[in-house]
Image (cartoon, helix red, strand yellow):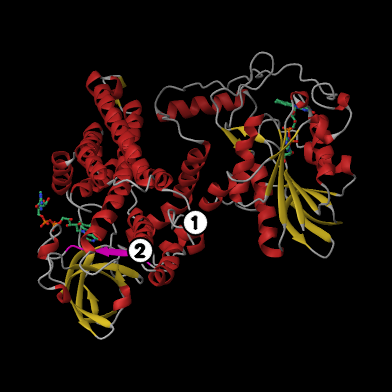
Amino acid sequence: MKIIVCIKQVPDVTEVKWDENGSLIRTGLPSIINPNDKNAIEAALTLKEEKGAEITVVSMGPPQVEEALREAMAMGCDHAVLLTDRKFGGADCWATAYTLGMAIKKLGHFDLIFSGVEAMDGNTAQVGPEIADFLGLPLLSYAEAIEVGEGTVKIHQKLGDLTRVIEGPMPALITCEKELNVPRIPRMDLVFECFEKEIKVLGMADVDGELENFGLKGSPTRLRKVFSPKRAKAQVEFLEGTPKESSQKLVEKLHEINAI
Amino acid sequence: MDFNLTPLNKMVIKTARAFCETEIPAIDAYMKEHNDYPPYLQEIFAKHHMLGMDIPKELGGIGADNFNLILIAEEVGKTASTCMLPFFMNNSVAETICHWGTEEVIKKFVPPLCDGTAWASMAFTEPNTGSDPRALTLTAEPDGDDFILNGTKRFISMANKPGPGVFFAKDLSMKGKPFDTTAFIVDKMSPGITFSGHYELMGLDGADTCDVFFTDVRVPKANILGRQGKGFPILLRWIAGERIQQCAATIGGGQAALDESVKYGNQRVVGGFPMGYMQGFSWMLADMKTRVEACRLLCYKTVKLQDEKNKGFEAASSELKVLTVPLIQEVCRQAVQFHGSYGYSKEYKVEKIFRNAMHLGVVASSLEINKTIAGMTILTQK
Ligand SMILES: Cc1cc2nc3c(=O)[nH]c(=O)nc-3n(C[C@H](O)[C@H](O)[C@@H](O)COP(=O)(O)OP(=O)(O)OC[C@H]3O[C@@H](n4cnc5c(N)ncnc54)[C@H](O)[C@@H]3O)c2cc1C
Ligand SMILES: Cc1cc2nc3c(=O)[nH]c(=O)nc-3n(C[C@H](O)[C@H](O)[C@H](O)COP(=O)(O)OP(=O)(O)OC[C@H]3O[C@@H](n4cnc5c(N)ncnc54)[C@H](O)[C@@H]3O)c2cc1C
């Protein structure tokens, strides 16, 4: 079985900050593999151990994404592909999915594609489904359990309070939830090996495609502005007096606003 | 000269940190409850492929180097977990057997030390000496294809765990020769071997260090490591490497003591502002940081020398200990002082780090012996 895992490198913050132009402030932040994508990697590695599989991780981004790809190989992935080109810059979800889709076509035969459900910085949860659409694959999204059968794949789809069991033929694309597994940490021997492995680097010319579909040019969505909305802060009022007095005041207040 | 870590070194550190966060809390909890290592401890290290760092892949090792092992040692040292001792021991004894052993001995004993099914020991100390090979009283007498060992070893780490131990004995067949110390690889579960209970130690909580009693224990001649009568150089080379690992772990402890103090200095309010900003305390932090940094740099330099393989690193490793013991012990004392009464309480990590740091001056060759090695080397070097 051949599995492709799409991973994104994201800044390691719980609270992302933007500058006035709406660009992510990345300076000084360590980069990590997007948490959901680690679940995707773990899912692929579990299948590799259970049924045997060859895993290729793919990421689009600047050259420093190499670090994330090496870490994925240190976790146990076999090959890594870096899609990097200045012309890929400024891509929205559509252009990202287009670029990843074109590259995946170039990589040849595969049985499954895994992606995370969503990226921690962009949070659109669109890229996985859009790749499936672009490649004409069945989409099995929000997976919290995966079971591979004979030419088919079944998942438990997380839908809030409900779980739906859905099945589709392979090849298929699965987007992975954090409930799916606990990602392993890299293995020390593979840490050394991953630096001996070659990362396949592909630019625009290598993946074919139409120039006007890549990067900022190919992005129908424009990020106009990012701002932190002003939220009204709750007011705290202290009711003075003895316990009896202050509780009487409290009852009056609650009457005033028709709460009781 | 390049003081920067490579991307590989950085990933080793990141991975070691992830290992410490995911595995060590449960290991420490077990050790607190049972006052011993978990029986499956080496398998945990093996699962993460952290054993046999400097051993070729064909023998089940990683085929890496000691520099990266030191980076892991520092991270494990930061946790103040005693599990660092068996981790170092399996690594360093496997390397020692590979360096001195016959092909037969290497094939037999090294792979189990890498796959975590065996626990290594290194046994020199006896009731009457921890430093002098001439004073050894564990005797080895030839008998057919075997030697028969009788006597006592003291303070031996991981002695009561299954696996090979390198035991240094007075070789009675070398009587009259200038050197009569021979190193034997002994299966610690052999008939005739018994153990005392664990020593109650100041630090290294949960360590299993104990005495080992030999009564007519048969060890095959094939298990001699190196040559008969040439055991002491094996000990000296092994201990030089082990010393670097223990120094690195203690430097990690010093770093953790500093980190804890910085955190405390920013949190604890004295006279209306965080106490760290009082000059007396900020100066203390400056002392601590520079001491840790100086020891770390010498540690990296020493291990680079070890990795060059063709140069002696014994004297350099002694110099490292001469610097590290007083400096890091002082850093850990300062950290306790920095925390006030809380530093003396088991609620705070610095208390444990301080107790651990005290071991460095008296275990795996004392500070004084290392001053002697380093000093005599200076005098006799051309
Ligand atoms: C604040 C903000 C808002 C944005 N809003 C929009 C918007 O509304 N519409 C829009 O089109 N774009 C938007 N973008 C741009 C968009 O986030 C990224 O440009 C796009 O490349 C990926 O989308 P995502 O990060 O939301 O990924 P998601 O769709 O959330 O990612 C899902 C999965 O797709 C895979 N994946 C995502 N990116 C890559 C990659 N580069 N390489 C490999 N695999 C990848 C990963 O497996 C990931 O887990 C926004 C960006 C920011 C910073
Ligand atoms: C937790 C723990 C674990 C241990 N694990 C092991 C183990 O696994 N294997 C093992 O073999 N041992 C082990 N030991 C023992 C330890 O290595 C020895 O105790 C140590 O080497 C010192 O030996 P000693 O106390 O017998 O000192 P002695 O040799 O009796 O020396 C007494 C004092 O004289 C000084 N001295 C001796 N000779 C000289 C000299 N030539 N120049 C200057 N000063 C000198 C020493 O510094 C020391 O202070 C362990 C000890 C502890 C506490």
**Viewer-nearest residue: A171 or A256:** A171
Dividing the image into 4 quarters, which one contains the N terminus of chain A?
bottom right
Residue at horizontal 88 percent and vertical 32 percent from the top: A209
Q: Please provide percent x and percent y for residue A146.
A: 74, 57
Q: Is residue B113 left or right of residue B338?
A: right
Name the mark on residue B49: 1
Q: Is residue B346 visible?
A: no
Q: Are marks 2 and 1 on the same chain?
A: yes
Q: Earlier in the sequence, mark 2 or mark 1?
A: 1
Q: Is residue A200 left or right of residue B117?
A: right
Q: Is residue B55 left or right of residue A178?
A: left
Please identify the quarter of the rendering in which residue B178 is found: bottom left
Q: Please provide percent x and percent y for residue B344.
A: 22, 41
Residue at horizontal 27 percent and vertical 54 percent from the top: B237
Q: Quadrant of ligand 2?
A: bottom left
Q: Which residues are magenta?
A: B119-125
Q: Please provide percent x and percent y for residue B354.
A: 24, 43
Q: Which residue is mark 2?
A: B97
